[in-house]
Image (cartoon, rainbow, N blue to C red):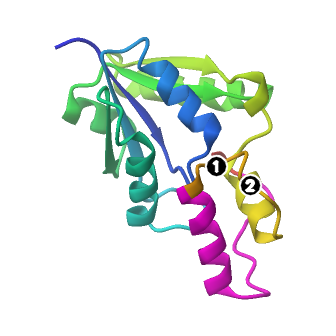
Amino acid sequence: MGITAIFPGTFDPIHYGHIDIANRGTAIFDNLIVAVYDRPLKSLLFSPEERLSFVRAVFENQPKITVTGYSGLTVDFCQQVGAKVILRGLRVFSDFEHEFRMALANHRLSPEIDVVALVTREQHTFLSSTTVREIALLGGNVSSMVPPVVEAALKRKFHELGDGQTVVPMTALRD
């Protein structure tokens, strides 16, 4: 059976930093569930269904990775799927503070679930979903930041929304 971990996030959209953390997680855990959260307290560009489809496309050939959506408390989802670990990524110092507080809160709710945080690779330290959305909104090239399926979806979404539709928050709450 082995150790199951979840890698939760909104993935709005998924980018190469997320993908790297998930792939590295498969070297540590027997099973990794990439869990796409459906109701965060922040503005989203893509629907839960769209985000799930991108993440599934990215990991379709990864036998150790399962992709699913979830709502509610992350620790409750862990208990539902039998996960003992929450996998997170750390990019910058402010991520540590946020993740530390979340880990303490999750430990208070479910002491049997641990958090493992992987430090991002240097080439991904600038990446956040907010950065990707803003660059794409302004017509910039995001091909080095996201998989082709996401790049195409970003172009389509901003074309559909038209000019003057700023749906990208200028300050990230947390990606």
Q: Is residue 121 above or below residue 141?
A: above
Residue 53 visible? The answer is: yes
Say the numbered circle drawn on residue 22. none
* Location of mark 2 (residue): 142
Q: Quadrant of the C terminus?
A: top right
* Location of mark 1 (residue): 146
The alpha-carbon separation of the residues under discs 2 and 1 comes to 6 Å
* Residue at horizontal 66 percent and vertical 32 percent from the top: 98
Q: Position of residue 128 (x, y in %)?
A: 70, 45
* Residue at horizontal 29 percent and vertical 31 percent from the top: 78
Q: Position of residue 29 (x, y in %)?
A: 36, 15
Q: Range of the magenta residues?
A: 149-172
Q: Position of residue 91 (x, y in %)?
A: 72, 29
Three-letter amino acid code at the position of disc 1: Val
Judged left or right of residue 162, residue 39 is: left
Q: Nearer the viewer, residue 111 or 62?
A: 62
Q: Is residue 13 above or below residue 76?
A: below
Q: Is residue 121 above or below residue 34?
A: above
